[in-house]
Every structure is written in C-alpha cells, then in structure tokens.
Image: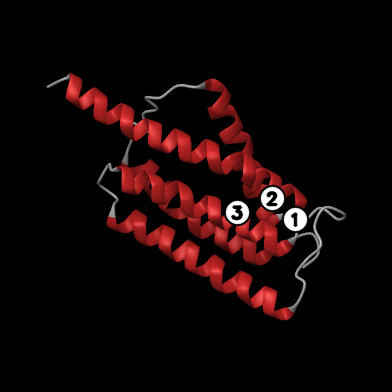
Amino acid sequence: MEWINIFGLVFMTVIIIPNIIFAAKRKDGFENLWENKTVETLEQIGRFCCFGFMVINIPGTWFGFVSDEAFALYLIVDCALTLLYCAVWAICFKKDSMFKAVALSVLPSALFLFSGIMLRSIFLIVSALIFAPCHILVSCKNVAAKKNKRSDTK
C-alpha cells in the first residue's frame, strides 16, 4: 500500500453509492435550509480532502499501520462503520429525522478519523477534524430548520 489505498477506495465507493441513489431518486436535490457559508465551505473542503486522502497516500504524510493487528482492526472497524452507514441509509431512506442526520454524519466522520489514525495519515486526520464537526452541525441544523419550516406552515 504505497500511493493508493485500495481498501480506502472500496470504503469510499460503498459510502458514495447510497448518496448517488438518493440523488437519482430526489430530482429536486438536497434543500439546504441552514445557510452558513463558512461552515459549508469548511465542510466541503474537509469532505473532498477526506475522500482523496482515504484513497491517496502522499509519501511523507502517512506512516502506515504499526502492526498486522492494527491493519486487521482497521479493516474490521471500517467495514462495520461502512455497513452501519449503508444500513441507516436503507432503513431511514424516506425519513427525515434527527437520528438519520446524526447517524449519517457521525458514521462517515468516524470512518475518516479512525482511518486517519490507523493509517497514521496526517492529512486524513486533519481533514476529518475539519469535516466532522462541520458535517454534523450542517446536518443537524438542516433537520431543525426543516422541522421549524414545517411548523411555521401549519
């Protein structure tokens, strides 16, 4: 595992699939009701950096696994987080709830941060630390804003 992390590519591909299905089914797209350009920009920067650094290892910025056991733990935990993410998508696909928002923002955040720590990837850890709080905040604020919007129209 030098420049390309095949396992990271597989995890990213699996996580992106439900998002593609969601986008295909919801032609109107995702309505962002909570607008904070700074947080949204940081979230997007963190997201795309996490995507990239899950797959691409830049020499000198990642140090690999400390042992075979660490590699096995990485595979087990990342598989579990990825499967949980897909399960939440499948179970909550048509629902808008705080549980769904929190789960679908915490699980990939945990995946990125855990992967960064296990890979000892400086850029992935930093990217995850930028992405996680911003993504969780945006997700939760959007659910709250949507709930307020519905109560205002009643």
Report the disc number at residue 125: 2
* CA–CA distance in space, label 3 to label 1: 10 Å
* CA–CA distance in space, label 2 to label 1: 6 Å
| Badge 3 element | helix
Q: Do the residues labelled 3 and 1 touch (CB within 8 Å)?
A: no
* CA–CA distance in space, label 2 to label 3: 7 Å
Q: According to the image, what is the colour scheme of the structure? A: secondary structure
Q: Say which amino acid is labelled 2.
A: Ile
Q: Mark 3 points at which residue?
A: 112
Q: Which residue is drawn at 81% across and 64% down?
A: 2
Q: Position of residue 102 (x, y in %)?
A: 40, 46
Q: Residue at x 69, y 50 (%)?
A: 125
Q: Mark 1 points at which residue?
A: 121
Compare residues 68 and 53 and report the one nearer the observer.
Answer: 68
Taking the view exactly as shown, the residue that stands out farthest to the right is 60
Question: In the picture shown, does residue 51 fall above or below 67?
Answer: above
Q: Say which amino acid is labelled 3.
A: Phe
